[in-house]
Amino acid sequence: MPENEYVLYPLGFLQSPLKEPGEAPRQGREGAPDAWLEVNASVAEGLEGIAVGDELIVITWLHRAQRDILKVHPRGDQTVPLAGVFVTRSTQSDFAYTG
């Protein structure tokens, strides 16, 4: 890992009825329940001007990801060659549910 360090401060939290990673479908289009973003009151004023239908980019930090895993078998299929976690949208990546 690079020697740079960054401090992150959450502006809010994604909420979902899913509580364990194993409950989630591999892709949202495979039957995932709705999720919502709860913004901390301390930064809510910064949302002024955002309207229903506006597109936002939400950067997530998947706090349960194993940061030392960089390659996985796509969709957990051991017959498929290993690929990088960022390509596979693996749950071991912080970018798993974007896109």
Image (spheres, rainbow, N blue to C red):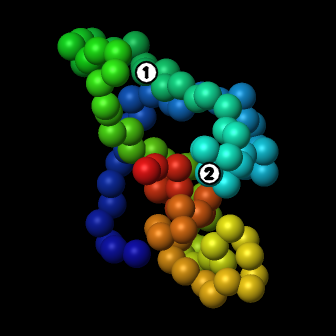
Pointers 2 and 1 in contact (C-beta within 8 Å) = no
In which quadrant is the N terminus drawn? bottom left
Q: Is residue 78 above or below residue 5?
A: below
Q: Name the residue under label 2.
A: 27
Q: In the figure, is residue 75 to the left or right of 14?
A: right
- Between 35 and 65, which is closer to the camera in this rendering? 35
Q: Which type of secondary structure does the marked residue at label 1 adopt?
A: strand
Corner quadrant of residue 16: top right
Residue, far left: 49
Disc 2 marks a residue whose amino acid type is: Gln
Q: In the figure, is residue 69 to the left or right of 8?
A: right
- Between 28 and 93, which is closer to the camera in this rendering? 28
Q: In this view, does 93 lie above or below 1?
A: above
Give the CA distance from mark 2 to mark 1.
24 Å
Residue 13 visible in rendering: yes
Sequence-wise, the earlier of marks 2 and 1 is 2
Q: Mark 1 points at which residue?
A: 39
Instruction: Write the residue at 32% across / 33% down.
Output: 56
Residue 18 x/y as whole percent: 72, 35
Q: In this view, does 49 lie above or below 69?
A: above
Instruction: Write the residue at 42% across / 34% down.
Output: 10
Q: Is residue 47 above or below residue 63?
A: above
Q: In the figure, is residue 29 to the left or right of 6?
A: right
Residue 59: numbered disc: none
Residue 19 x/y as whole percent: 74, 37
Q: Which type of secondary structure does the marked residue at label 2 adopt?
A: loop
Residue 64 visible in rendering: no
